[in-house]
Amino acid sequence: MGGIAEDDTTLSPGKPRWRRRLSARRVFPVFEWLPGYGRRTFAADLGAGLTVGAVLIPQGMAYALVAGLPPVVGLYASVFPILVYTVFGRSRQLALGPVAIVSLLTASGLGSLAGGDADLYVSMAASLALMVGILMVAMGAARLGFVAQFLSQPVLSGFTSAAAIIIAGTQLRNILGVDLVRSEYTLDILVDVGRRLDEVHLLTLALGTGAFALLMVLRRWRPAIPWALLVVIGATAAVTLFGLEDRGVQVVGEVPKNLPSPQIPSLSGERVESLFPLSLAITLVAMVESLAMAQYFAARRRYRIRPGQEFVALGAANVTAGIFQGYPVAGSFSRTAVNAASGALTPISGVITAAVIALTLVVAAPVFRPLPKAALAAVVFMAATSLFDVAEARRLWRVKRSDFYLLLLAFSATLILGIEKGIAVAVAASLIVILQKTSRPHVAVLGRLPGTHVFRNVERSPAAVTSPGIVVVRVDAPLYFANAEYLKEKLERVAGDREEDLQVLVFDMSSVNDIDSSADRALHELADDFEAQGIDLYLASVKGLVRDVMRRSGLYEHLGADRFFLSTDEAVRAAETRLMADAIPLETAPRVIVIEEKL
């Protein structure tokens, strides 16, 4: 990698924790790779940065249109935020900037709040970026990044597939040259198209569909070439040469020939209250998208990503976007792939990309005045095709139907209810699935494999044997308030089914990594109930953290140290010895009943 050092943040063990946390290399990851930066590395980063810049110019302008903003705002969001991420971010390949999903979320949330005031809309978009950045920094500093994990892959796939349809729908106005209704509901847009077919501007339609078809063909032929920029330049030249603007083709118009100046957007109480739900939704989606790409390429290039640090870096980039008149940004799937494929080795490639955008704004901005909106819409259409994930739906249908139904729910809710409500329904469904799995664990009977210390499910291992007098229960889940009562009822039911011969119940806790006060109390009550029935409760493989809770609650002393065992096999053999000592007849071949509770 041209002398670039891999991630190494280890400090002397003797240094206090706070000094390790505040070390320059942890706060500013740029110091990890900058000391070994060389000419060969710069050459690789230069090629990648120029390529991504060529892709980002048309994409940034197109995604700004999706967000309902002037195209130049997409370029504003592609300069300083990238530079800030270079300093704070750990990913060496992540390409930051405007992305389709975040742009759609921005449009869906701000459309009803701005009331048709264009200046207010731009101002609120900057405020939104600032709020998203603050949320990201706060979540990263507080180590709350796990919240983003509630957007599972099936949920995200269903959401993005529906979003792809909605994104394409929002650009029909630019493809058809008709001032269609502005809505996040695709059906409303299609109905409006049907009513106004006689208003379609055929020249605009030909230009837009021709640009889209050309992009799709060229992308398949040579995907590494920035065809989007070349097609946009060609369409702009066609408008100029043939006077298409005078014939009704809508163009971008004047693009300011300067870099954005810093100004703090308003964060009044009323604006914060109205934008908070939207900023939270964008924060979750942006974090999931960005972290997924960052971790993927970090694993391939053998360096480490710290999610908390990454969230802080993304947050700082979004704060910068808000200050410099942009709108929320995130890591782009497509541009990150292009960046990596083009040979990017460090975030310097992002600096070069930002320089390309800045140079465009300062020098070449007037060139884009006759850029037809239909060509930008074609770029958006091409991006939307890559978001629609049919292959993932097929895979989930084959691998796990419940995940497929979760994808279908996220897809349908987003299309029918809209972006924000759709993602809320999808996250709620994910939480319900998690709670359902952890609150009602699956139960399976296991037996000991003859001649071993191993227990297996008797339904899957016919050789496993069981014996009367002893029941072993294993729980493969943390014990907490949501499953405490269910666990108690399940164990009581197991004991009741074997009331005539049950003498010892062994609770295998090898997979229990946590226990709360509610579950501890349930175990306390269970032990008392069993004691009244003449059943001994043994606990096996109890982890230290769980045992500490039991000591503080008094459960450890209540049961007695002789009821705790290092392993299930040790507990079962102790139970067998006790039964033998009590002259309870056993089978010739010792058998054990084992019940396993799994997520």
Image: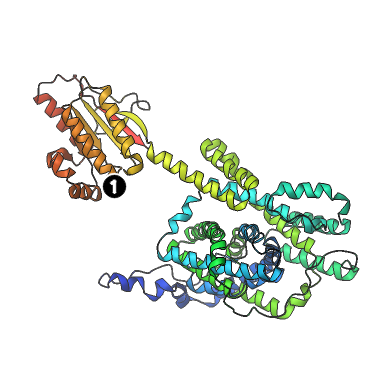
**Residue closer to the observer: 503 or 34:** 503
Number of marks drawn: 1
Say few, some or many: other residues with alpha carbon within 10 Å of mark 1 (under 14 / 14 to 19 / 20 or more): some
Colour mapping used in the image: rainbow
Find disc 1 in the rendering and name its residue: 516
Image quadrant in which the C terminus is located: top left
Q: In this view, does 397 lie above or below 31?
A: above
Which of the 4 image quadrants contains residue 470?
A: top left
Q: In this view, does 364 lie above or below 421?
A: below
**Left or right relative to 163: residue 212:** right
Query: Outermost residue, front direction?
Result: 270
**Residue closer to the observer: 191 or 407:** 191
Residue 444 image point, x, y percent: 35, 30
Residue 248 image point, x, y percent: 88, 64
Does any portion of residue 512 appear in the rendered image?
Answer: yes
**Left or right relative to 138: residue 450:** left
* Residue located 59% across and 79% down the image: 262
* Residue located 60% across and 45% down the image: 413
Residue 472 image point, x, y percent: 25, 31
Residue 111 image point, x, y percent: 67, 60
Q: What element carries label 1?
A: loop
Does any portion of residue 306 appear in the rendered image?
Answer: no
**Left or right relative to 148: residue 53:** right
Which of the 4 image quadrants contains residue 350?
A: bottom right
Which of the 4 image quadrants contains residue 510?
A: top left
Label 1 amino acid? Answer: Asp
**Residue closer to the observer: 557 or 209:** 557
**Residue closer to the observer: 556 or 304:** 556
Q: Is residue 237 above or below residue 483?
A: below
